[in-house]
Amino acid sequence: MQLDCFDGPLDLLLTLIKERELDITTVRLAEVADQYVAYIRLMESLNVEVAAEYLVIAATLVFLKSKALLPPIPEELIEEGEETPEEVEERLRQRLIAYSRYRSAGDELRKRLDDEAGYLYRDGGDPTTAIVQRFALPLDKLSLALAAVLSRAKSEPSTLARDRVSVIEQMAYVARTVRERGSARFSELCAGYHRHEIIATFLAVLELIRRGRIGYRQDEAFADIDLFPVTHSAREVAEAGTASEG
């Protein structure tokens, strides 16, 4: 079960911490409470069964933040067996560290899988030999598509200050749009955007592709990028398209 582009509440919390370039082993988790709660409020709709998992972490972060703003509780007033705020934070921190290790391991395995996906093996009829053909990921075509969209971006007057666009917000927007529509074009997602908004959206698309949340297809250089939800059949289409380009 996922909340848009995140694999659960720990994934969202870890992403917020890494986005601020904080160390999960030393950061006071109360520091990201506001961002965590704000992100949940941004969601247009929540599945009740999934929301409970996110709200438990949100409640824990709010608890830690409230305790950080108050004087320490005298030891004589702490009931026997009751967890202190420090113990609650350390327990959540250890869960987060363990999840970070699992996610890093998953990213490494996914990278190896992506690397292997660039090879096609075929039996050459001789058990001592094999015919091997490699297909390269056309990153140059993706960059050309980005350049084409940027060329159509709105001009940005230097006298106006604009709000910064969060990559994780754009990840949620792209993932939700692709899921609801069934497919979407990169140019459509960036319609009416300024340059910094287009770049944030492009980075969001790359991260979603890296995580395997969405697939993409591009027929030729400078062509628009078609984005679609990743299913078993969609993955086969994407691999077939990559093979034909090789």
Image (cartoon, rainbow, N blue to C red):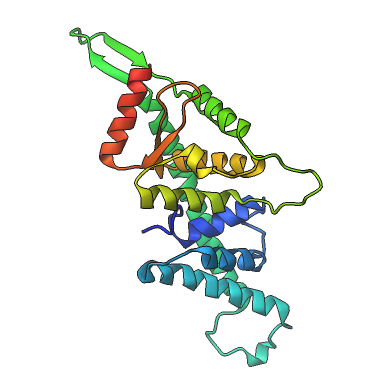
* 71 relative to 172, above or below: below
Residue 18, image x, y percentages: 61, 51
The image quarter containing residue 46 is: bottom left
Which residue is found at the position 47% from the left and 48% from the top?
174
Percent coordinates x, y for residue 115 in the rendering? 42, 27
Residue lying furthest left: 125
- Image spot of residue 223 (x, y percent): 47, 26
- In the image, 77 versus 149, the foreground residue is 149
- Residue 130 position in % (x across, y down): 27, 11
Q: Residue at x 54, y 43 (%)?
A: 191
Measured along the vertical axis of the image, is residue 72 above or below residue 93? below
Q: Classify 109 as above or below 120.
A: below
Tell me the quarter of the image containing the C terminus.
Answer: top left
Residue in the picture at 48% in, 55% down: 99
Residue nearer the viewer, 110 or 156: 156
Foreground residue among 164 and 9: 164
Point out the residue furthest to the bottom here.
77
Quarter of the image for residue 1 reads bottom left
- Residue at the far right in the pictured view: 159
- Does residue 44 lie above or below 217 as drawn? below
Q: Residue at x 48, y 41 (%)?
A: 188
Indicate left or right for 85 with 219 as reference: right
